[in-house]
Image (cartoon, coloured by chain):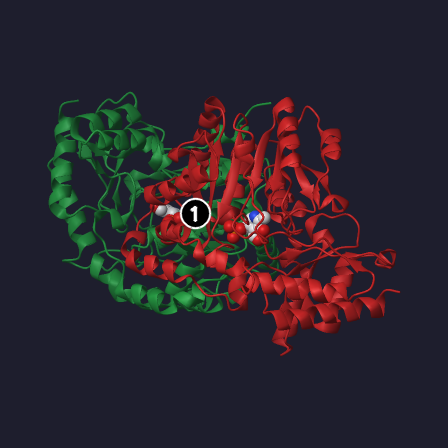
Chain colours: A red, B green
Amino acid sequence: MALVAERMAGIGSDIRGKNFWAALDLEKQGQKVLKLNTGNPAAFGFKMPESVREALIANLDRSVGYSDVRGMIDARQAIFDYHKAKGIEDFDIDDIFIGNGVSEIASMIATALFDKGEEVLVPSPCYSLWTNEIILSDAKPVYYKCDESNHWNPDVEHIKSLITPKTKAILLINPNNPTGVLYSNDVLLEIAEIARQNNMMILSDEIYDRLVFDGKEHTTMAKLAPDLTILTMNGLSKSHVLCGFRCGWMVISGPEAARKEINEALLKVASIRLGANSIMQTIIPAALADTEYPNSMIQPGGRLYEQRKATCEELDKIPGVSYVKNDGAMYIFPKIDKGAEQIANDKQFAYDLLMDKHVLIVPGSGFKWDAPDHFRIVMLPEAEILRDAVRKMGDFITKNIK
Amino acid sequence: MELIANRVETIGTGTRGKNYWAALDLERQGKEVLKLNSGNPAAFGFKMPESVERAVTQNLHRALGYSDLRGFAEAREAIYEYHVGRGVKNFNIEDIFIGNGVSEVASMIATALFNKGDEFLVPSPCYSLWTNEAALNDATSVYYKCDESNHWNPDVEHIKSLVTKNTKAILLINPNNPTGVLYSKEVLEEIAKLARENNLIIIADEIYDRLVFDGKRHIPMASITEDVLVITANGLSKSHCLCGFRCGWLVISGPAQMRERVNEAILKVASIRLGANSIMQIAIPAALSDSQYTNQMIEKGGRLYEQRAVTCEELNKIDGISYVKNDAAMYVFPKIHKEIADDKKFTYDLLMEKQVLVVPGSGFMWETCDHFRIVMLPEVEALRKAVREMGDFISKL
Ligand SMILES: Cc1ncc(COP(=O)(O)O)c(C=O)c1O
Ligand SMILES: Cc1ncc(COP(=O)(O)O)c(C=O)c1O
């Protein structure tokens, strides 16, 4: 008998893959490595919102017990109000489930909904959490292209061509990781129409919705398609830099019958683990009320804003590299335009960059992007450090790719 | 296409089944319900250890980011010391994974280990977490009997009769939930031998190991075998009343080669979810060095000790009930010597008539309708009253 499960063969995360461990090894040898592999703001000096600290300490005694299986009622009330205000209509407070991060939420969704033989449409490039969870539930991720020449919007024609009788759901990540873009309402409406005609559920991971620059506005998918079954995911890891709290949730909206059935299945899955951690639940109302905190990061003068600016300025100076400027989040996904055919293996490219410049990035393949010509920059270090890192990338690229 | 995955049907709801939701409905109608379905000390006024409160408030800034995939190094250091102190050998600090409760740890283990067709030996009665996780990962749970007439020890002969070429692992819950007993050294040794002979992985859920009464000693499974792969699960939910923190961990011990392969698989699973919550991890070193907190609950005069005493005293007065006195934890699993057709109906009726919620044997995959579990967490007088109500209800059957 095999010692470990066969399903493990399909699992991988290049965000914490071989190059990540190589970077840790370098650090153990005393080298300084700039790790731009994960969107973990705390690692770059972002501080906890005061509102959150106060709420946590004031409520610590409420954190001791298992919470309600779906989540604490006042936390769900705050989440309910938030999504109502964003324009989601058909759901109620029991259609909200709080989990240990969107990560756990994704696992609960895949466990409750997907079976062997079913197909789920996921973007390429795609944040690896979702493909891993789909594979663990024996379903098959089918990749639709996002079109760099169309501001990385999903390629609607490609989506249409991939639909089969087994297609159960489509995943949207908006604002996106790794591209950082915001999708256009036209594209969202077209995807809604496809889902409507093909009886597909929509999973919409909107964890970056509060981190949008330049006065642009994020439209929640469920507002555009109230008649469809939509699972909207969100959380506090990014907007309130609380990755370590493991705070995420989902909202089920749409027609009542499907909503109820999904709710019951998710409740069963959620009860196995009794409840999400209570500590982070006690701070959800305070965090969602504190819009000032995320806003201060994304305005001119704010860290995320200025770090993006510095990154783009330096990227502009690298010949042979192009990029779509991100609208949100903390990521940008540049393209090596010239000479990319010289890169046989983008993991090796990232490894060589790490060894040469001590900068760790995740290449396109880590997001299921199938050409070796992209990589993601996590724009979390202070502007000057980022400037230096991007220059090093440019240096490496011009030196190695002719 | 079905809306819901087929596997959902296999999930047993254990301590949060239909009767639990019926109890919440009663509460919504304004009734007072004594909910003895779950081992959640905070619901009964148990307070967090001051050591933990201090550690959390002072180190909060460290809880902001994703942790190391396996868990914070100093939390794992404390866990390492703890298990070495308990006699576990053949593991190192990287063989420890911290998770959001033993619940998440169980999910990671099952995901990393089980293939379709694998058989998993689990106790009957059994805490439902493990069988659910096995089922979600396509393994088949095969139930071995625990023998009430032998202090609820696993029935080793029965276990032997169940081993097939598909048997991959055996689960021990020691101290046990729902029976609350401690297994004997002889039985543990026999199970170790059986695992060795049949090349089985042992999964030892020892979350109650610090809550043992009467000066008895818990023997960690991993301390009596060095050549068998043992995955030990433990956590702070019970010993430090921190259920809401979701703090659990696993320790892989045994032969290096197997350990490494299992470690690698679990690491892959763990990396999907980035890390366990960081807040509880900053509490681990403080909690594990605060044995005082745990001990004052189980000593004479301590809440868990006295609540057990009262429960037993009242159970002794009920005709038609017998029980094995628990050695540990907060549970007792009495037997009803009366005809009961459906034990879920029995507990539903008890809930409706007496507003006391308990989980029947079937919630623990016990196959005859003649047991139920009492969670001995309320203060003595509340427990006394509750057990009397149960007695009253049972005597009228
Ligand atoms: C698109 C997306 N979804 C989910 C997550 C996971 O977030 P959480 O910390 O809530 O598990 C991330 C984290 O990077 C992400 O980028
Ligand atoms: C035997 C056993 N294992 C695991 C658990 C789950 O504990 P945690 O809170 O660490 O998920 C419990 C909780 O009651 C239990 O009784």
- Give whichever of B346, A81 is nearer the camera: A81
Q: Residue furthest top?
A: B341
* Total count of labels: 1
- Name the residue type under label 1: Ser
Q: Residue furthest bottom?
A: A30
Place of residue B119 in the rendered image (x, y in percent of width and height, measured from the top left):
53, 38
Image-based side of A83 in relation to A215, left or right: left
Residue at 73% across / 71% down in the picture? A392
Q: Quadrant of residue B48?
A: bottom left
Q: Quadrant of residue A113?
A: top right
Residue at 80% across / 66% down in the picture? A397
Q: In the rendered view, tell whether residue A296 sits above or below residue A102.
A: below
Image-based side of A171 in relation to B91, left or right: right
Give the SS element for disc 1. Answer: helix
Residue at 61% across / 69% down in the picture? A383
- Give whichever of B298, B97 is nearer the camera: B97
Q: In the rendered view, tell whether residue B7 sits above or below residue B211.
A: above
Place of residue B88 in the rendered image (x, y in percent of width and height, measured from the top left):
44, 63
Image-based side of A245 in relation to A216, left or right: left
Image-based side of B377 in relation to B134, left or right: left
- Give whichever of A227, B306 is nearer the camera: A227
- Give whichever of A144, A349 is nearer the camera: A144
Disc 1 Cβ-to-ligand 2 distance below 8 Å: yes
| Residue named by callout 1 | B103
Disc 1: host chain? B
Which part of the image, by quadrant, shows the C terminus of chain B?
top left
Place of residue B104 in the rendered image (x, y in percent of width and height, measured from the top left):
46, 48
Which part of the image, by quadrant, shows the N terminus of chain B?
top right
Q: Residues within 10 Å of mark 1 (few under 14, many from 20)?
A: many
Q: Is residue B24 visible?
A: yes
Place of residue B208 in the rendered image (x, y in percent of width and height, measured from the top left):
33, 53
